[in-house]
Image (cartoon, rainbow, N blue to C red):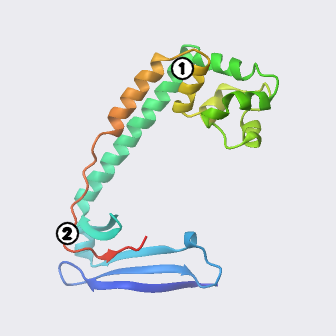
Amino acid sequence: MGTDRNEVVNIACPCGQGRITVTNCSPDHPYARDSQSCRENSIKCSDCEAKYRIVEQEKKLVLVNREDCERTEAAQKQKQQEMDSLEKGLWENLEKTGVLDSVVGYLNSFRTAAAAYRRLSDLYICRDIDDFRKKFPKQNCTKERLRQYIYPQALEKLLARMQMPSKILEQYFKDDSLVRSRTIPIPKPIGDPILILNR
């Protein structure tokens, strides 16, 4: 079993000394799924490869300045790191103030996982009762399980159900919103699109 390769773009690079190619690849059997397919983008010119990148923007493959692209990627990485740091700090503060212990005690107070699920099903923590039983077994909830399975928005609803609103969560949502709303610069395309994508 091999791979079918279909070259859909073969054009001159900006300096004219090489080529830009786009190749669609998929398994060469009749049962191939879309998830098994991929696309190979290539700048076959050492000078242009050092200056440019091929990226997808608005369902188009376009050529952009490599330095602009690297700045965008660095900004995206920084943004994600800040969001991760905020969430890590959130859970640490919730533990220090005893909020997590209160939530664990609340979930473990139900006689059965089914009873807890009926009370909490509107929080969309789990897809179904069997999933809930796996994540929160009868009277065996832990702080580690809370961190793993309950996202901050669901925790806010849960605390409201427990009549324990948290200022720590309120501040987290404000700080997280500020970071998420920060604009990331998008590299400007150079020239016409290389390829218009169907998906």
**Could you say where residue 141 lies in the image, as x and y percent from the top left?**
72, 27
State which tag comes first along the sequence, 2 or 1. 1
Q: Where does residue 67 sit, x and y in percent of width and height?
A: 23, 58
**Image quarter (top left, top right, bottom left or bottom right) of the N terminus:** bottom right
- Where residue 48 sits: x, y (%)? 23, 73
Q: Return the residue nearer the eye: 63 or 196.
A: 196
Does 93 appear above or below 188?
above
What residue would you read off at disc 2? 190
Number of labels in the image equals 2
Q: Is residue 47 left or right of residue 110?
A: left
Label 1 sits on residue: 94
Front-lying residue, 38 or 134:
134
Residue, x 45% and y 79% (percent of image)?
24
Q: For the residue labelled by badge 2, is the local secondary structure a helix, a strand or a loop?
A: loop
Give neighbour class at mark 1: few <14, some 14-19, many 20+ (Cα, 10 Å): some
Task: Give the CA separation, mark 2 to mark 1.
Answer: 48 Å
Vertical side of 54 occupied by 104: above or below: above
Q: Residues within 10 Å of mark 2 (few under 14, many from 20)?
A: few
Q: Position of residue 142 (x, y in %)?
A: 69, 26
Circles 2 and 1, Cβ within 8 Å, touching? The answer is: no
Q: Secondary structure at mark 1?
A: helix
Say which amino acid is labelled 1.
Answer: Leu
Which quadrant of the view contains residue 102? top right
Q: Quadrant of residue 117?
A: top right
Amino acid carrying mark 2 in the image: Ile
Q: Is residue 111 left or right of residue 80?
A: right
Residue plotted at (45% across, 36% down): 84
**Pick the front one: 74 or 187:** 187
